[in-house]
Image (cartoon, rainbow, N blue to C red):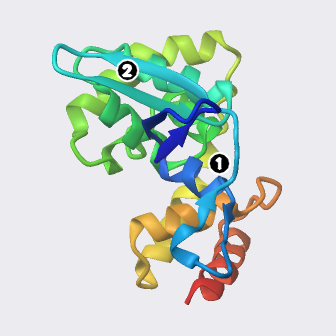
């Protein structure tokens, strides 16, 4: 996404799919190609490399905090950290790490079993120290709902995006799938 400041300067900002989906688009009815995203405020992280300066944007501090925590692990770069941010809401990722559930992390392209185990090993105590409650049934329900949607023919990405829109109060996998199917049905 490209962000322009009040002074007219534009910056390329890398964001998770979840963040981009939460930003409403202003549609120009007369000239649709001039449609643009709404004005928003973001938390940002500047990644300095030898050959580039990259800016990463987040809608809330919890997302930025998790991104920076993941990025601090040796072998996990900003693109991999952003990939992890794409798989589930921040709270679900934290609970999965605290529970030692590597299956969430291995869904990310470029993160295999060993890397997922390393993330869990390094962050498990940090998550427990921050008071993250490990609710294994909730994680199982989410995994079951995702698996059900994929078995119905939806891609992992479509299924994750639909499940992210389902309210957390809806706990059972069956009800989460029904709600996600309503969202997916509107898109087609």
Task: For marks 2 and 1, give the CA distance.
Answer: 28 Å
As drawn, the label of residue 63 is: none
Query: Which residue is at the far right?
Result: 169
**For residue 144, above or below residue 7:** below
**For residue 18, above or below residue 9:** below
Residue 38: x and y in percent read 69, 53
As drawn, the label of residue 137 is: 1
The residue shown at (22%, 40%) is: 112
What number of labels is visible? 2
- 141 sits left or right of 123 in the view: right
Q: Nearer the viewer, residue 128 or 14?
A: 14
Residue 175: x and y in percent read 73, 72
Q: Earlier in the sequence, mark 2 or mark 1?
A: 2
Neighbour class for label 2 at 10 Å: few (<14), some, many (≥20)? some
Q: Nearer the viewer, residue 78 or 76?
A: 78
**For residue 116, above or below residue 148:** above
Which image quadrant is residue 78 in?
top left
As drawn, the label of residue 71 is: 2
Which image quadrant is residue 105 in?
top left
Residue 18: x and y in percent read 56, 51
Neighbour class for label 1 at 10 Å: few (<14), some, many (≥20)? few
Residue depth check, mark 2 versus mark 1: number of the one nearer the observer: 2
The residue shown at (70%, 41%) is: 40
Query: Which residue is at the far front?
Result: 7
Helix, strand or loop for disc 2? helix
Quadrant of image for the C terminus = bottom right
């Amino acid at each position: 996404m490209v962000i322009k400041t009040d002074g007219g300067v534009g910056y390329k900002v890398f964001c998770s799919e979840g963040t981009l989906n939460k930003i409403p688009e202003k549609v120009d009815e007369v000239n649709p190609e001039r449609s643009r995203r709404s004005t928003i405020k973001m938390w940002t992280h500047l990644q300095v490399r030898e050959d580039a300066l990259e800016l990463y944007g987040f809608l809330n501090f919890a997302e930025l905090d998790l991104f920076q925590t993941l990025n601090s692990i040796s072998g996990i770069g900003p693109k991999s950290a952003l990939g992890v941010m794409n798989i589930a809401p921040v709270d679900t990722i934290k609970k999965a790490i605290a529970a030692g559930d590597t299956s969430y992390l291995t869904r990310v392209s470029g993160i295999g079993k060993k890397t997922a185990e390393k993330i869990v090993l390094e962050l498990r105590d940090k998550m427990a120290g921050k008071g993250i409650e490990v609710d294994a049934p909730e994680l199982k329900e989410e995994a079951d709902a995702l698996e059900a949607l994929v078995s119905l023919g939806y891609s992992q990405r479509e299924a994750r995006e639909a499940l992210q829109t389902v309210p957390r109060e809806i706990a059972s996998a069956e009800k989460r799938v029904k709600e996600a199917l309503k969202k997916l049905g509107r898109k087609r």
